[in-house]
Image (spheres, grey):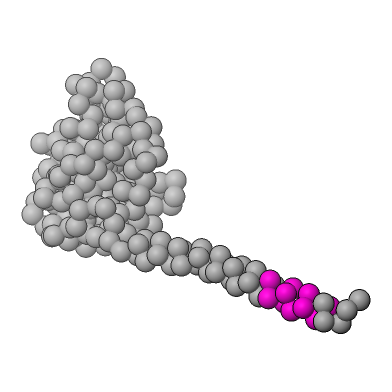
Amino acid sequence: MNPRRVLAAGLTALAAGAVLAGCSDKKTGQPSASTGAAGSSSASAGAAPRVSDPIDPAQLLSDPCKALADSQLSGLGLATGEPEQAADNVSRCVWKYPEYQFNTVSVEGAPSRTRGLDDIYELKAQSAYFEETTVASHPGVFRSDSDQRSDGSCTLWVGLSDQAVMLVQGYFSGGSPQVAKSCEETAKIAEAAVTTLKGGS
């Protein structure tokens, strides 16, 4: 074989290999740039409204039964609250309605939600219902994975600060008038709790 032809073939192969390597490097670099952009986006402020008048959640987390003052209970139709442990080992307080023994409302902090309502807004796509509201000038959202509002169950999240939320859940049954307005009743309890936590009760 002609030596010149062998040399030319070798140079052609080397050039083709360099081109392929260059293409491979460019494609490998593209995903990392995309990942970087996504990371900077997730680090920015979320979709939830900002809290202009933040409340320290320390008291709610340490003693949730103090979220409602004794002076508020009779007006809300509630008996004295009883503390209990939630499934995630968070302390919460449960108040019963003496007139309807199966009706309860609970209030608790959510220490794992360190981004406040932003953490709740991230769950919007998988929510059975998601309705924004305002509770005593604080942003809130009615939100749950399952919709049992017509059966007397409602879940409300309230932003205490941009890093803390309060969870209020109402359960109403037994033909009580609260069944038809479960979220309205839950919001009333939440408003009273915010007022107390602000020190205004």
- Name the one closer to the observer, 50 or 169: 50
For this orientation, the residue located farthest to the left is 200
> Is residue 79 among what the camera can see?
no
Q: In front: 78, or 117?
A: 117
The spot of residue 81 in percent (x, y) is: 26, 43
Question: Is residue 177 among what the camera can see?
Answer: yes
Q: Residue 52 colored magenta?
A: no
**Residue at point 22% right, 59% down?**
161
Q: Is residue 176 left or right of residue 85?
A: left
Residue 141 x, y percent position in the rendering: 24, 43
Q: Is residue 130 above or below residue 195?
A: above
Q: Is residue 22 left or right of residue 99?
A: right
Position of residue 5 relative to residue 28, above or below, is below
Give the image location of residue 144, x and y in percent. Answer: 34, 37
Camera-side residue of 7 and 84: 7
Q: Quadrant of the N terminus?
A: bottom right
Q: Quadrant of residue 52?
A: bottom left
Q: Quadrant of residue 164?
A: bottom left
Residue at the image position 82 percent from the left and 77 percent from the top:
5
Residue 92 screen position, x and y as percent: 33, 48
> In this view, which residue lies farthest toward the top?
175
| Magenta region, main secondary structure | helix
**Residue at the spot x=59%, y=68% of the render?**
23
Q: Quadrant of residue 50?
A: bottom left
Residue furthest out toward the right: 1
In front: 95, or 138? Answer: 138
Specify start and end residues of the magenta stretch as a single range: 6-16
Residue in view at x 30 percent, y 30 percent: 153
